[in-house]
Image (tube, rainbow, N blue to C red):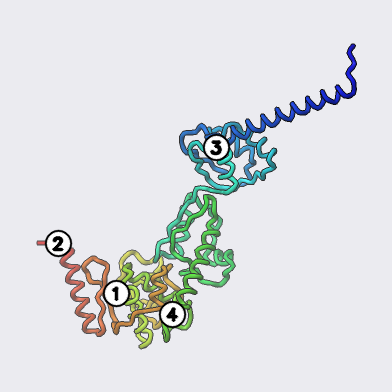
Amino acid sequence: MVRLSGKLLLRAALLLLLGAVMAGVVGLGALQRSLEAPGQHARTVRVQVRPGEPLRSVLNGIAARGALPDARLVELWLRIHRRSALVKVGTYDIPAQASAIEVLEQLAAGRVVLESLTVVEGSTFGELRRALERHAGIRATLRGRSDAEVMVALDAAGQHPEGRFFPDTYRFAAGATDLEILRLARRRMSEELAAAWAARAADLPLRSDYEALVLASIVEKETGLAGERPLIAGVFTSRLRRGMRLQTDPTVIYGLGAAYDGNIRSRDLVTDTPYNTYTRAGLTPTPIALPGRESLRAATRPQESGALYFVATGAGDGAHVFSATYDQHRAAVALMLKRQRQSAVGPR
């Protein structure tokens, strides 16, 4: 038997250790290169990360779709580099040929596919709630709750919800809750209203920013033409100054609620409700819709032209004729009715 001296044994051990280290370095280098290499998937791969889903399940799902080489190697790389394995919930579109490292970066950064919801100017709070419930990317948590209960959930107990939410296009990760979106829209309206009220004209016949919100909602429902909003706001402002009733159909329609069938009749104009501005003076008790930025600006900086009346042109262009006297207004109404009759009959 050959006996090795202590020095030889030490040298052999060092050589073995060095070989192991070199092999490890080579292995780590190969692992790094493999995870930095372009992926084999030729198309965008969509994956869904669900709440509470373990990392291994997420990585296995991506690997099964061909967007990762080997989920176990990815986990090994994370352990070696002591990287956090937090993955944000949502839907991800993994780009074609993205490397495993790029996939991990996308997951960690939460670069999810964004859903969108457009809240139309002039829609009502009820219509907003229905849109939230119908949206496939929004998690419904408020279904079945009353409007009052919704406002309690928004830390706004006692507030009427109408008009309190800003109409805009909202983008969010799939799985966002209806409450989160309402909270965002409510904050946006508070900001927009505060800005409009801060820039208001002097000597408005409005006592608060809430009255400005009410007036803006009426303006929003009266016209879709941006250029007319300050003029229409001016008519209502002039009427408020003179103590005249606003006499605007959209408020009557809002007061009818579910009883409105698409037609407003003479009897509706004389049937009293808190929102009937033909039977009651002043502004309505609450807004009647969700006003946009331009209507907020119009309500706080109206263009008072001397007109006290307006009526649709009847030409189908959405425009209105503005009049300073009732006689002028009657003539404009007669012309509008004539145009409507001609339009119904058609060209001869």
Q: Earlier in the sequence, mark 4 or mark 2?
A: 4
The dot on residue 150 is: none
For the residue marked with disc 4, what is the amino acid? Arg
Residue 243 sits above or below residue 261 on the image:
below
Q: Nearer the viewer, mark 3 or mark 2?
A: 3
Reading the chain from its start, which is encountered first: label 4 or label 1? 4
Find the residue positioned furthest to the bottom.
Answer: 242
Q: Looking at the image, do the residues carrying marks 3 and 1 touch, with CB atoms under 8 Å apart?
A: no
The residue carrying mark 4 is 200
Q: Earlier in the sequence, mark 3 or mark 1?
A: 3
Q: Residue at x 48, y 55 (%)?
A: 171
Spot occupied by residue 231 in the image (x, y as percentages of width and height): 32, 77
Rounded to the nearest angstrom, the CA distance separating label 4 from label 3 is 55 Å
The numbered mark at residue 266 is 1
| Residue 256 visible from this viewpoint | yes
Give the structural element (helix, strand or loop) at label 3.
Answer: loop
